[in-house]
Amino acid sequence: MLKQRIITAAILLPVALIGFFLLENLAFAVFIGVVVVLGAWEWARLAGVAGQVARVGYALVVALLLAGLYRFPVFTAWLLPLGVVWWLAATGLVLSYPSSQRHWGGRLGSLVIGLLVLLPAWQALVVLKQWPQGNWLIVAVMVLVWAADIGAYFSGKALGRRKLAPQVSPGKSWEGLVGGVLTSLLITAGVGLYQNWSPRELVLALLGAALVVLISVVGDLTESMFKRSSGIKDSSQLLPGHGGVMDRIDSLTAAVPVFTVLLWLAGWGAW
């Protein structure tokens, strides 16, 4: 398993770096779109759609919606705030699982939720790419999420006692959550001091980083909630040793839209 994980990571890392740093405009949108469409194919299974034809059909619907969003960027103004509202609602669904299942709307509702998970994440990355220092903004949000994951893993292993969401993901603890947030805040503070941010800028950055990390955990738990409801361990086996695409991007689907909206509110760029 470890060998598979290493080989898969060694292949995916250069592909991801090329996609993020060298592709622009339509090519970048298509690159991210491929990932999102594969995630949609997996999400259909999490929503209870077993047939391959139906799952492919759902993925094609998502692909058409992405094409429409790229053709008509005016929808960005409502899609990204809608994504933020969804993740706030998802927090309540995760915390109240399994009783929250009655609010999902069955299979159709779960498929609609998949759109709320995937479309804003794609749109947010396309927006970030167009802003000043877009490549580094994308790297920044990924570092925040990955650092939080690493910090949560080690602090949870060493100190984890109280379960964060035992009905959804029994392995996660409150201690791990705190450790993950602190890890990301330390990195943010280090960058702020290096860049000579003003005290106000540093405080706002720390608050924003904490919010992004917390919502990234909700993204992780949301996918876990749907997997648990469906009795599925991994979203697919597309990535040997790593599970599926959704297993790798679940935290980012929540973090990226919130990160983008926060930067927009701070006056970083326009959409």
Image: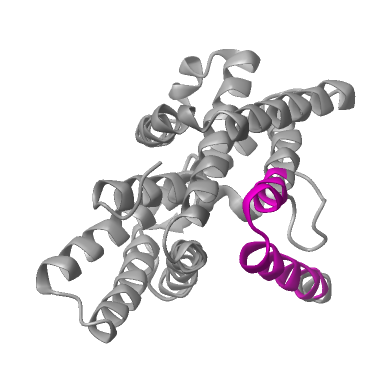
User: Would you place residue 106 above or below residue 143 in this image?
Assistant: above
Quadrant of the image occupied by residue 64: top right
Where residue 216 sits: x, y (%)? 44, 51
> How many numbered badges does the structure rendering display?
0
Residue shown at 69% from the left, 65% from the top? 16
Where residue 25 sits: x, y (%)? 62, 51
Q: Is residue 245 visible?
A: yes
**266 relative to 200 in the view: left or right:** right
Q: Is residue 220 visible?
A: no
Where residue 231 sits: x, y (%)? 69, 35
Q: Which residues are magenta?
A: 7-33
Q: Quadrant of the C terminus?
A: top left
Where residue 90 sits: x, y (%)? 42, 33
Residue shown at 36% from the left, 70% from the top? 184
Residue 17 on the magenta segment: yes
Residue 93 or 192: which is nearer the viewer? 192
Residue shown at 65% from the left, 16% from the top? 107
The colour mode here is one colour
Q: Which residue is outermost to the bottom?
A: 194
User: Would you place residue 257 above or below residue 146 in this image?
Assistant: above
Q: Quadrant of the N terminus?
A: bottom right
**63 relative to 166 in the view: left or right:** right
Residue shown at 69% from the left, 29% from the top? 62
Residue 238 on the magenta segment: no
User: Would you place residue 144 above or below residue 237 in this image?
Assistant: below
